[in-house]
Image: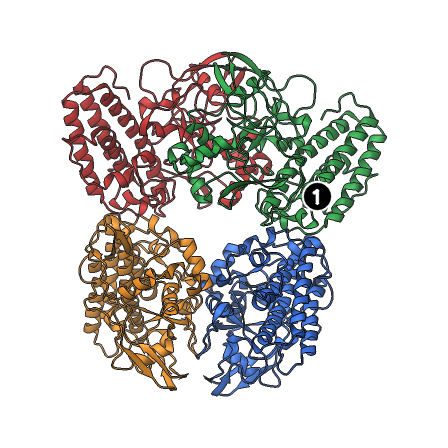
Chain colours: A green, B blue, C orange, D red
């Protein structure tokens, strides 16, 4: 989201819409679902709603004499990781926090919203404007994570409850298309003036050898072939760490695949469905994606290869995040900003790989070819911080 | 609870009251609290409500042609440990079960209640009567555990919300009273015809040497002296395993004691309170209780010693469970009943110690001197299975 | 071992023999074997040799002006658990201690032996005499543990090296004999004047109901029937904790049973042998022993039942330690001695069960019917502290 | 090591020298030291001696009719990770393997050496020649790891035994020198015909922005300043994962720094020494190195930056391995070789970072500017696979 050139009225409207969308995403939930943390990587929906609010309160409102905080402890509860802003609830204890209740969190949201909208109405400094822009993009990121976390929570109920039909990939995939790129020097990273995150900054030249890359997603059917060919039993297809992970967590199919009545099914946000062999395969860890590529005698692209391919008209993306084999590292010339906001990116630039593209749950304005998402190697799609 | 000699109308009434009391205990809770499992030893309140219902459904209604189950999966969700009755949700995943919702569980309760009440109205076989008696006593046990688990859940919120004032110990303790028992042969275990659990059965003679036992509870003030004398830093006062537990879990005061504004406070169900030095100390693990006794140059009683002392008029009990140093083992002559119900006691007769007496949260009719409660040695008061 | 009435010359001789026997037990070992700690419950043979020496040094020699310690750090290295005597090497790090070397430990032994023998020659106070007696019994206990630990170390080599033939049970077992005991009041615990450990003291009367007890050990053949009947797959036969242990550590047969060329073998100190179906079954955990009894519709005895039965002429024991279902707790009237030696027993009187009888590796003078051995419930025979 | 152009006699000589050097490195050890695995990352010296031998046996001798294996089980014992070559002893159980003994391993070495030298004498195919070259380089890698593992083993004895004086860094460091590199396109990776590992292959062009890099190592004195400035207590200086690692493993100074008599000491292979403030700081994890750079307002170089700087005459290296912030990933165009040898590199190309330069323990012919070493982020110098 980019507020450049927006009037105050337009900013107010964008603020309202974005904030309301988070709440709309939670409408299909039961109160009981808001608090669940079935695995440490998942954050409870209530926490997302509160943490995104805390961001505006901390970076925009706090310290202003006109602002009366809702509850002195919210900043303790919903700070996710900013050590420079004080103590936090341990990440794995978020699900234990039954209080404040959902209703109180909603009050907190509306209390902060009112104050932010009043502030916008009174005019914004450049710094305030860019903090709002960052806060809205931060909220959009959490909206995407909310969808993943909701999927995890509902997909781990024995009743497999339906959420809604909005996040179903409609079209089938077929992986026979390839995009060819010539050897050359290419520019990588964000250029121009629109909104972008720090980690995309500092566009720079990069040399690539000639390569060919699939421009379609791998299908469930192809992945099933890999499984039926003994993919999960062959240590030669896996990284050493990936093989260990397989043994430890003991999985032999993608997350959300469920064997029922001797047929494969897949839990989708629309409920439990028979596996569609022509739909793209979802929720693979990096290790699984890499092993599949090994089995195909292929390899995963680097993020630079992906980004350059994504400039080609025949290369489509934006349905599902795609693993690259690039470690998430700062671009040459990256310097982290000062202050608490600067803490964010650098401290995660380790032990994670870059994913590119965007998914059906990504905010539309985040799906751009320079966007760098990042996950730990065993992630199969849930909230990452 | 004892149904001997009750008319069907009286049984209906006792059934209704007992079942309603479980729901009343949950009235002060927010929906969010029903699902919390902040530590694996705690069961979510929703789970208690469902599991006690499942007991009546499984042992009384299932298999009757007139009974239509509410939902085929409830028996999977809320079986706690009976292997002979099939698969169960893993104990540490109870908090992840957001569905069925609280409202659905309440419907489940009322559905089963209706069927049970109809059954009672039609007359009961002896076996049905004793299953109902067992089910109501089982529910009463869970009512007590509910109180402990609610305390844990609310006591681990940073807001320390108040539950209600019903579970406050009114009177102070003073540990200067002693009861003396002479050497002799005493009868231990339940005799007579009232309700009692399997593990109390088989009254038997037991030889005791002369001993003297405190007939009052240890106070917070006395325990604080132990702390201030370096109790928690002295390995000589602890069992080897207790000392290791201390290092691993890193605690230096009783559960629910909170240091705030340089004063000790205690979380009670009535909210956070300044520590009352004259009130009895609560929520000690066996290791802590044993270490305190070492420090006093005393020892904990065996369960037989406790039970014999409890016959004396000057020996009061029933406010707080009291650790004995007796392992929870079958009495001589104990034989477990056949079938699933028989699974219950024997399989837990290991790695646990007996507690005696009863607490302010115990059902009144459970507080008898032969009642054998049991916990693992590190428990400080929460749901035990 | 009992020094009552021994002359100084006899004491010297008993001291020499006992100390030498520890070294003889290690003769079949390679230097490499002395240091191994393949699991935390095993102590390296070198450690046993040093720790038993440290006992004499600490409790008998230290502080005497005529005694020059061998190395100031030995007392740090080889203190096993006595908190009152200062810091110790963490138990799970004993195998990492390559220095001092075996040769240096032998020097340490001989240095201490020389000083002790000199001391004996000069005459002994009563306290010194009883410390030597305790030290020699302590060394004998460690000799037994040495054999178990050596078995574990060699039995976990892929080459299954032979140790020697001295510890082979010669006779077969047949479990058709039973001993019947009448209801009555019996005396339990050590009476008389011979050597005994603290925990046997305080003989006391105990009431027993009539019972019948097998007077022969269970055979490998009988245990194999249990296995072939699905014993390890039936949760109803196990304690809840036992079943969890089974799942976690994933074992389905007794320790040291090895399936090779489609036949069961057993690692013995004489090397890998085909399983002898008529020999007694060895190395069961308490959980396995209990499950076997459940399967047989029997139960394990209490320690009192065992001790009374052991007075009967038809009841043989001393080949293998036998699990009882009694928790290891102090006898009525037990008071721990003052000082560091007093630390020993009480601090382990928790989370352990009593075993009775003695094994082929036990010192002959330890096999008496009042001797109380104790292990954690998952132990199958290795060093316990 | 490069065998190109060597005569058979020269190859025999190089083979002999290299093999003997491994044994020489172990000469200062006691037998007890050969088996130690004080932490899972360390391999026992005996294991290094056997595994390097196994490499020649498996890849050069096995299957030849003239070759009689020494013991059929060695290939099981000392395969480190090659899944395509069958089962292996679990990595964390290497220290439990007391048999075969050191003497037997030495016999195994000499048995294989004899067969290899005979083979060389009879003439070599190209494939055999390159397998010998690879095997010798593999042995040299393990010689380096041997030194690190020996340091770990001896440095974790409470006696801090001296190894020898050969691995002491003589010269002091002073970090005031900087090397400046201009923006440009540089070639990265190995070119030419000498020996090199797979992962250096496929030289390729890389664009670098202008940068300045220290050409001297950081000193103990500088690192101490970081410590005294509260470096280890400041979460803002650490990666999020690094900070968690710090809390979990609870370290507050570099490995081998020991506080004794209120002064910092450092365990060196020459024994415990007072900390030399002017010597380069050693044994930092990546997290510590990164935090130090943050504190200095600097950053770690990428491996390309390091490699280009290393071409400059004022840039010295080879004393200590230097962390880069580049993930260990294949170079563009890398294809793993077929067969078991091909398993080696690719499967470790994840979760590791590249180190460059070489240490005082590195084989001289390995210290070249294209050499890519790699470790997990928490490593501070011990055997890596």
Looking at the rendered structure, the secondary structure element under dot 1 is: loop
In the image, taking residue A128 as reference, residue C104 lies left or right, namely left
In this view, the residue in front, D258 or D30, is D30
Q: Position of residue C57 (x, y in %)?
A: 31, 62
Q: Is residue D121 visible?
A: yes
Residue C294 position by quadrant? bottom left
What residue is rendered at 38% in x and 17% in y? D190
In this picture, is A261 found above or below B90? above
In the image, taking residue D37 as reference, residue B42 lies left or right, namely right
Q: Is residue B268 visible?
A: no
Q: Position of residue B371 (x, y in %)?
A: 56, 76
Mark 1, other Cα within 10 Å: few <14 / some 14–19 / many ≥20: few
- The residue that label 1 is drawn on is A28
Q: Position of residue C339 (x, y in %)?
A: 41, 69
In the image, taking residue D271 as reference, residue B220 lies left or right, namely right
In this picture, is A48 found above or below B247? above
In the image, taking residue B302 as reference, residue D189 lies left or right, namely left
């Amino acid at each position: 989201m980019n507020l450049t050139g927006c009037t105050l009225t337009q900013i107010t409207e964008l603020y309202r819409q974005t904030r309301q969308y988070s709440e709309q995403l939670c409408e299909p939930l039961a109160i009981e679902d808001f608090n669940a943390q079935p695995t440490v990587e998942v954050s409870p929906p209530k926490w997302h709603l509160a943490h995104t609010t805390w961001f505006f309160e901390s970076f925009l409102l706090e310290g202003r004499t006109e602002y009366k905080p809702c509850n002195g402890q919210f900043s303790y509860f919903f700070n996710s990781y900013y050590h420079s802003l004080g103590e936090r609830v341990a990440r794995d204890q978020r699900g234990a926090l039954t209080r404040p209740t959902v209703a109180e969190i909603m009050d907190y949201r509306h209390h902060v919203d009112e104050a932010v909208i009043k502030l916008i109405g009174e005019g914004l400094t450049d710094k305030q404007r860019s903090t709002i822009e960052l806060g809205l993009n931060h909220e959009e990121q959490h909206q995407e994570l909310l969808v993943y976390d909701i999927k995890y929570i509902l997909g781990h109920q024995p009743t497999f409850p339906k959420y809604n039909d909005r996040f179903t990939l409609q079209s089938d995939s077929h992986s026979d298309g390839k995009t060819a790129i010539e050897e050359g020097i290419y520019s990588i990273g964000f250029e121009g003036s629109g909104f972008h995150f720090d980690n995309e900054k500092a566009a720079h030249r990069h040399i690539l050898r000639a390569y060919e890359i699939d421009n379609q997603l791998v299908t469930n059917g192809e992945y099933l072939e890999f499984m039926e060919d003994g993919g999960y039993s062959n240590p030669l297809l896996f990284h050493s760490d990936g093989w260990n992970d397989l043994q430890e967590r003991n999985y032999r199919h993608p997350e959300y695949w469920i064997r029922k009545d001797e047929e494969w099914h897949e839990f989708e946000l629309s409920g439990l469905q028979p596996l569609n062999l022509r739909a793209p395969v979802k929720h693979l860890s990096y290790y699984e994606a890499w092993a599949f590529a090994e089995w195909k005698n292929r390899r995963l692209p680097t993020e630079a290869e992906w980004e350059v391919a994504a400039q080609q008209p025949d290369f489509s993306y934006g349905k599902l995040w795609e693993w690259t084999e690039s470690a998430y590292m700062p671009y040459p010339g990256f310097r982290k900003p000062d202050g608490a906001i600067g803490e964010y990116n650098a401290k995660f630039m380790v032990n994670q790989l870059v994913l590119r593209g965007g998914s059906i749950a990504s905010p539309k304005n985040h799906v751009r070819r320079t966007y760098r998402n990042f996950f730990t190697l065993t992630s199969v799609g849930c909230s990452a911080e």
